[in-house]
Amino acid sequence: MYRSYNYYPNNNYNNNNYSNYANNCNAYYMDLIPRLEEYIQDELQDSAYYYALAELAPTERAKDILIEFGMDEAKHAKNFQRAYYMITGRHFIPKPLDPIVIEDYEDALKIRVLAETKDYEKYGKEYLMAPNKYLQDLFFNTRTGEAKHAMRIAILFEEEGEED
Ligand SMILES: [Fe+2]
Ligand SMILES: [Fe+2]
C-alpha cells in the first residue's frame, strides 16, 4: 500500500526549535536593555568619581593615573551607549549623577578596589552570556579595563606612601 512519506518528519519540531531560539534571543535582548542602562549610568558615575579623586591625588603620577581611569570609564559608558543604540534604536538619557563625596583618599582607593573587582566579575558574566561576537568583545574589553584599574590602584597606594 502506498503511503505518502513525510520527508520532513521533524519539520514542526524544527520550526518550534527555531522560534524558541528566536524567542530566547529576544528575551536576552529584552533583559539586556535595563542592564545596559544601569551600566551606562554606573560608568558615568565612576568616571566623575575618578576625576574628583584625581583632584586629591598626592602626586602628579597618581593624578595622571586617576584621570586616565576617568577617561576609561567614560569610554566604557560610550561603548555601552553604542550597543544600546544598536539594540533599541535610541540613546539612553542618563539620570543626573549622584553627588560625589570623598571623605578620605586612601579609603576611597580601597572602596574602588572592591568596586573594580566586582565590575570585573560582572562583565565577565556578561561576556559568557553574550550571544554574538560584538557583545562578547564589548564585555571582554570592558572587563579587561576594570581588571587594569583594580591592579593599578596598587600603584596609587604606593604613591600615597611617598607623599612627603
Ligand atoms: Fe568601567
Ligand atoms: Fe573601572
Image (cartoon, rainbow, N blue to C red):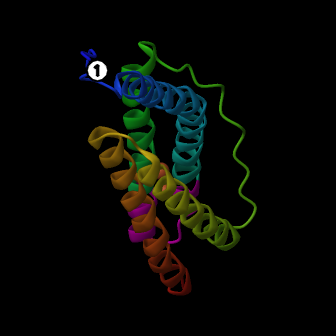
Q: Which residue is pictured at 45% across the width and 13% down the height?
A: 90
Tally of numbered discs: 1
Q: Which residue is pictured at 70% across the width and 71% down the height?
A: 107
With 124 as the anchor, is 14 left or right in this view?
left
Q: Which residue is pictured at 58% across the width and 32% down the height?
A: 31
In the displayed structure, 138 sits above or below 16; it is below
Residue nearest the observer in this picture, 26 or 136:
26
Q: Does the numbered disc 1 mark a residue whose Cβ is under 8 Å from ligand 1?
A: no
Q: Is residue 62 magenta?
A: yes
Picture quadrant of residue 3: top left
In the displayed structure, 96 sits above or below 48; it is above
Q: Is residue 58 magenta?
A: yes
Looking at the rendered structure, the kind of residue marked 1 is: Asn
Residue segment shown in magenta: 53-67
With 7 as the anchor, is 9 left or right in this view?
right
In the displayed structure, 150 sits above or below 26; it is below
In the displayed structure, 97 sits above or below 102; it is above
Residue nearest the observer in this picture, 36 or 104:
36
**The C terminus: image quadrant:** bottom right
Label 1 neighbourhood size at 10 Å, few (<14), some (14-19), many (20+)? few
Residue 106 locus on image (x, y percent): 65, 73
Label 1 sits on a secondary structure element that is loop
Residue 68 locus on image (x, y percent): 38, 55
Residue nearest the observer in this picture, 77 or 15:
15
Residue 159 locus on image (x, y percent): 48, 80
Residue nearest the observer in this picture, 127 or 26:
26
- Magenta stretch: dominant SS? helix
With 7 as the anchor, is 152 left or right in this view?
right
Residue at numbered disc 1: 6
With 145 as the anchor, is 156 left or right in this view?
right
